[in-house]
Amino acid sequence: MSKEKQIAVGVVGLGSMGLGMAQTLAGKGFETLGFDLSGERKALAKKSGVIAAGSIAAVFERSKFLVFSLPTAKDVAGVVNDHLDMLKSRKDDRVIIIDTSTSEPDVSRDLAATLAKIGHGFLDAPVSGGPSGAASGKLTMMIGGAEEDVALARPVIEAMAAKALHVGPSGAGNVAKLVNNLLAAAHMITTKEGLKLAFSAGLDPEAALRVLNAASGRSMMSEVHFPTWIMSNTFDSGFSMGLMRKDVRLARELAARTGARLPIADLVAELWTGSTDLDDSDDFTRMGAFQTSN
Ligand code: NAD
């Protein structure tokens, strides 16, 4: 039996990201249990070697490592708090939660402190790289938490992430992710405005994009998102407007709490939340459509 086969990993949340992570872990030999509120997502996971757990309690009972991929901090806290008694009963068997959700630093700090008191670990470990990065094990992960927990979780982290950066204590991973996504949200808008200007001045936007990507105006938005999902009109990156709106809101709240004055971030957040013709369920790449009145 391979070393990985003996390590049970539970993945809670099998959505656009969690399903790919569970498939990656199962494909790399970990005994992978998956749970989602949606039976459809569990059925998809089962098709690729993930053990579909009958209940979330079963995942908490059996897993040494728990990977969370849930929409919000409230979901993360709800799932942990609902299972504290079960975790207390496993006090001599350290469990580590690797929370890959884009969550809130204060919530992660509280959960890490609560779990530390009963002998378990909690890492805030949000990710970048989208559903394709999750499915290929090539995510970038930014981690906050205790050094010894990062070391224990290293085999699971390395199976999911091509780059894993331990950036500080609990909450630091969430802060890094909010900073990153604030910039991604801004780059989506600035790139869109650049192409809109090119178009209105008679320059082919495809040619303008080629220039940006060979010059100093480029970003991951211009290099990956515009060519793959916007210029092609497919708008199916797998990341929703609702989740990006959450991220810019959280970044703005963090700025307000810490006293950082960020005038451009305020405008970016207003543009993302105020684009009323786009629903939360729309793909976030729709914000880059530059031949509209948005
Ligand atoms: P998603 O909405 O596709 O998936 C979330 C899943 O969680 C759903 O299948 C839902 O049924 C499940 N769920 C909700 N509450 C649950 C609970 N209590 N127990 C079990 N399952 C539950 O979202 P996603 O796009 O996969 O994103 C997940 C997280 O990763 C979010 O925090 C998001 O901000 C972050 N993220 C997403 C991307 C992306 O490109 N999609 C990239 C990086 C980070």
Image (spheres, rainbow, N blue to C red):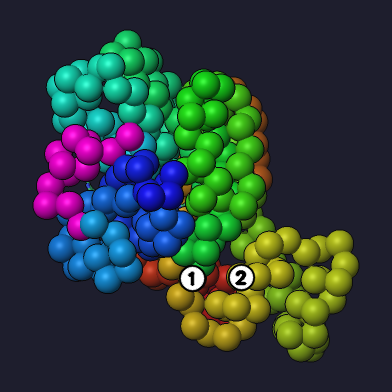
Nearest the viewer among 126 and 284 is: 126
* Residue 108 percent location from the top left of the image: 41, 27
Q: CA distance from mark 1 to mark 2?
A: 8 Å
Q: Amino acid at mark 2?
A: His
Q: Is residue 269 visible?
A: no
Give the magenta range: 52-64
What residue is drawn where x is 63% and y is 74%? 226
Left/right of residue 146 with respect to residue 60 in the rendered view: right
Q: Residue visible at 19% across and 35% down?
A: 61
Check residue 154 for magenta coloring: no
| Numbered tag placed on residue 225 in the rendering | 2
Percent across and percent down for residue 203 are 80, 86
Does the closest atom of ligand 1 sit within 8 Å of the Cβ of label 1?
Answer: yes
What SS does tag 2 mark?
helix
Q: Relative to residue 136, is residue 24 drawn left or right? A: left
- Indicate whether 226 appears above or below 98: below
Question: Label 1: which residue?
Answer: 237
Looking at the image, can residue 159 be seen?
Answer: yes
Crowding around mark 2 (Cα neighbors within 10 Å: few <14, some 14 to 19, many 20+) is some
Expressed as whole percent of the image width and height from the top left, the position of residue 261 reads 64, 31
Q: For ligand 1, tell me if the residue under mark 2 lies within 8 Å.
A: no
Q: Residue furthest left?
A: 54
Where residue 76 sits in the image (x, y, percent)? Answer: 30, 37
